[in-house]
Image (cartoon, helix red, strand yellow):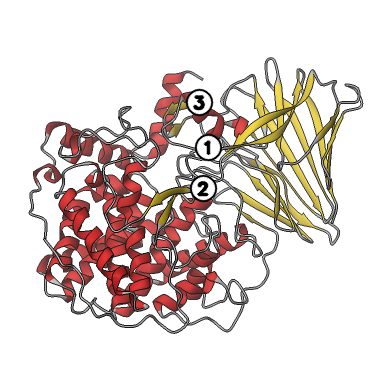
Amino acid sequence: MTSAFIRARTLFALGIPNLMRVALYRVGLRTGLHPVCRLRAVAPAGPFFRWPLRAAPVGAEPRSEWRRQGSLFGHVRVAAGDAAPDWMTSVVTGRRIPAADCPWWKIGDFDPAVGDIKAIWELSRFDWLLAMAQRATAGEEPEFRRLEAWLQDWVRDNPPYLGPNWKCGQEASLRVLHLAATAWIFGQVADASAPLLDLVRLHLRRIAPTIQYAVAQDNNHGTSEAAALFVGGSWLSSAGHPEGERWARMGRRWLEERTARLIAEDGSFSQYSLNYHRLMLETMSFTETWRGSLGLPRFSDRFVGRCRAATGWLRDMVDSGSGDGPNIGANDGAHVLRWSDAPYRDFRPTLQLASALFADLRAVDGEGSWNQPLRWLGVGLPGRAEPAPQSRVAEDGGFAWLRQGTAVALLRFPRFRFRPSQADLLHVDLWVAGRNLLRDAGTFSYNTDAALMDYFTGAAGHNTVQFDGREPMPRLGRFLFGAWPEASVIEPLAEDGQGARMGTGYADHAGVRHDRLVELWPDRLRVTDTLSGFAHRAVLRWRLAPDNWVLDAGDRAAGVGTASRDMRLRVTATERWESCRLVEGWESLKYQEKSLLPVLEVCMEKPCTIISEFRWVT
């Protein structure tokens, strides 16, 4: 299959309307003719909020972050004093962007002088605003004064539509949602100050003209920006601003359209990512609570149903004991509208709120940080608990969960209605009693060297087989793979009272075939891989939980074994393996952070069947 044909077929799969939206947007920016390029405004001076405040709800506990230091991407520590931070400096590299006073549309996405622009944007998402606001409602007036000082400093240092922090419509949207959440807990929505409403209006003027570009991405940009238009627009409308109603209608229309298009009936979201799934549900949940608080008309049954299904998908992914889940899909460190001190990789607060709102069910029992979003937003804790997750297949998104005892095996197979961000074809994640024993590499960074990007997003970063040293889908751009394969189900999910099993497989654009049968019992996992069609070599990788693993290579005919303190892995094959080794690999549990872990690599030179059996101490 020629590269030109692959590119053409991939572009067609992205959708002609989306390609037209992107093309018109880029031409408009390049020529300066896009309406967003003509925006001009004067920033409001503040103050934005008023003291005294209403008290925090009963049982609502303020976050501790951003008192002396904050955390970005879940691990990057940022000092937090009385003086506001430098909004134009990367929190990762410490370098300051050289185009701080330039119109945002003239600033590049990946300027090597700055590095990853997300490391500049992150402070301007206003996570600190909500944390300081919570403490202010607990009676800490100094926190209120500091919050107001930081916000006024941001407005002064980020003149409307100039500099990097106005570059992305989603970034502007997340600020709107945090401003609205802060006004909510302050009790200052109905009588918001004129400067605060002016600041919201400035942001909606930035978001609305480029909503078509956001929609063309078929990802969280469209959901976030639609949510901001609905929330901000309805807020302005309630305060008598005539343009608010138009923005609110636009936001509602796109929220309805985006949920119907991007969330499948089985709950899978278009980005095939645990962290982006959380971001989508965080915005949807706040939007729904905002709608109810203003007494606005309900969203459609389809909207609520898709959000309920998305909540169920998250419930299937999350370990109830730790709140963590498989490190699947792209992960850029996004975590917005944080109401508690729960760790970055604890998904239970988002799950509990969404389950209460969209299913009227309690997803997590007991008392903990997962209940804080409900307390702050005045959402009652449902009396009925969600039933325990069962083995199931989310066919639309390409996910299957096999459950036996305390063991959960996640099988990822290609069902790509939307562009995949990672080559995780037939990846298997294994969790036993809350421990992630077989792991996905994660993402690390969107702006790093090509080798690292290829590693984390490619086959080497997943528990699968790589053929002839290439990727199963050719990379066509930083965020685009081509020649998306379609999996066929070889053996449907079945359980017999003793174990669960499912088989699926795919053929790639080069004619290589990989079939995988996954069988799970309470004390072991067996994966059978049948490989054919490759030219030189196939490398099976198992990315293992960090531990003191010992390799017992045995002989090439009998197979290979490796073991840690409480887990054993044995690999056998119908052909002699060419090499077998235990190597160091990378994993990234949080954006811009990576660490080492052991990886078993078994290399085969002929078509064959490989059986990998994992046993653990229960």
- Give the residue pinned by disc 1: 422
Tell us which disc is closer to us: 1 or 3. Answer: 1
Mark 2 falls on what kind of element? loop
In the rendered view, would you say 253 is above or below 269?
A: below
Under mark 2, the amino acid is Tyr
> Which badge, 1 or 3, comes first in the chain's sequence?
1
Name the residue that disc number 3 marks: 474
- Percent x, y of residue 310: 51, 61
Label 3 element class: loop
In front of the other: 2 or 529:
529
Q: Position of residue 617 (x, y in %)?
A: 85, 52
Q: List the single residue furthest toward the top.
A: 536
Marks 2 and 3, the one that precedes in the sequence:
2
Q: Residue at x 19, y 62 (%)?
A: 200
Q: Residue at position x 32%, y 46% from top?
A: 121
Q: Which residue is mark 2?
A: 272
The numbered dot on residue 233 is none
Question: Which amino acid is tagged 3?
Answer: Pro
Q: Please state the horizontal and vertical placement of residue 6, each as a whole percent of the image.
A: 46, 25
Q: CA distance from mark 1 to mark 2?
A: 9 Å
Do callouts 1 and 2 mark residues in contact (Cβ within 8 Å)? yes
Q: Quadrant of residue 47?
A: bottom left
